[in-house]
Image (cartoon, rainbow, N blue to C red):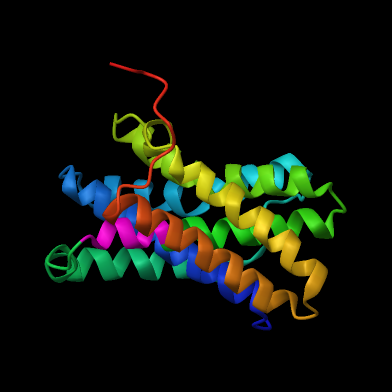
Amino acid sequence: MVFTFHNTVELAGIMAFAMSGALSAMQKKLDVFGVLVLTFATAVGGGTIRDLIIGSLPVAWLKEMELITAMFIAYLIVLFFSKHLKTLTHTLFWLDTIGLAFFCMIAIDKGIIFQLNPAICIALGTITGSFGGIIRDVLLNEIPYVFRKDVYASACIAGGIIYFLLRQVMDDYNLASILAGSLIIVIRVGAKYLNWQMPNIYKK
């Protein structure tokens, strides 16, 4: 495998979501097999949905063993260093946020390769970025975060819009992807620490 910007970002996203799934499973006191299942489902769930939607078959993790290797390394890191990871403030939040941004931008780029409309690419990025977390939360019998906090999906939409705007004025699409992904992270951080929220339709 030749490491390009695209697959390096995908590997980073896989590891971030894998560690997120593993930590969530350990918080629920699942056994080592249960942790592995959550790790795998969270890491490849979004990418699998992405590839199925656009007809990129076999899905990426069946063709690129590096993705499975990255997922398994993340699993082992959490398994053996969980006590240290748990002492880090908001570790789970940061892993989930990084995975969301990386997966969203990778899916948008893949949609562009398949010559999809920009709006469809943004929707694809939002679905891909969100779905790993949805699978994780459903398997842990929790209401998915994306359904409780609108800024989760809205951050992807904002990042996607900015990405396509940047592509109109920048020749370096990789830099445009980094800037748009950074915006997704900033929005999620603002939502958590500065209480940025979408309007609440349930008025008291």
Where is residue 99? Give x, y as percent. Answer: 46, 60
Quadrant in which the C terminus appears: top left
State yes or no: residue 94 in magenta. Answer: yes
Observer-nearest of 152 and 92:
152
Direction bottom: furthest residue: 2
Direction front: furthest residue: 204
Observer-nearest of 14 and 130:
130
Q: Is residue 7 left or right of residue 115?
A: left
The answer to whether any part of residue 140 appears in the image is yes
Observer-nearest of 37 and 183:
183
Q: Residue at x 25, y 65 (%)?
A: 78
In the depicted structure, whether residue 45 falls above or below residue 172: above
Q: Residue at x 15, y 62 (%)?
A: 86
Q: Main secondary structure of the magenta part?
A: helix
Where is residue 146? Give x, y as percent. Answer: 43, 37
Report the magenta residues as a range. Answer: 90-97
Q: Is residue 76 left or right of residue 7?
A: left
Which quadrant of the figure has residue 83?
A: bottom left
In the depicted structure, whether residue 187 falls above or below residue 37: below
Observer-nearest of 78 and 172:
172
Where is residue 130? Give x, y as percent. Answer: 50, 44
Q: Is residue 193 left or right of residue 164?
A: left
Q: Count the numbered circles shown.
A: 0
Q: Is residue 142 left or right of residue 116?
A: left
Q: Residue at x 43, y 62 (%)?
A: 186
In the depicted structure, whether residue 65 falls above or below residue 194: below
Q: Residue at x 43, y 49 (%)?
A: 42
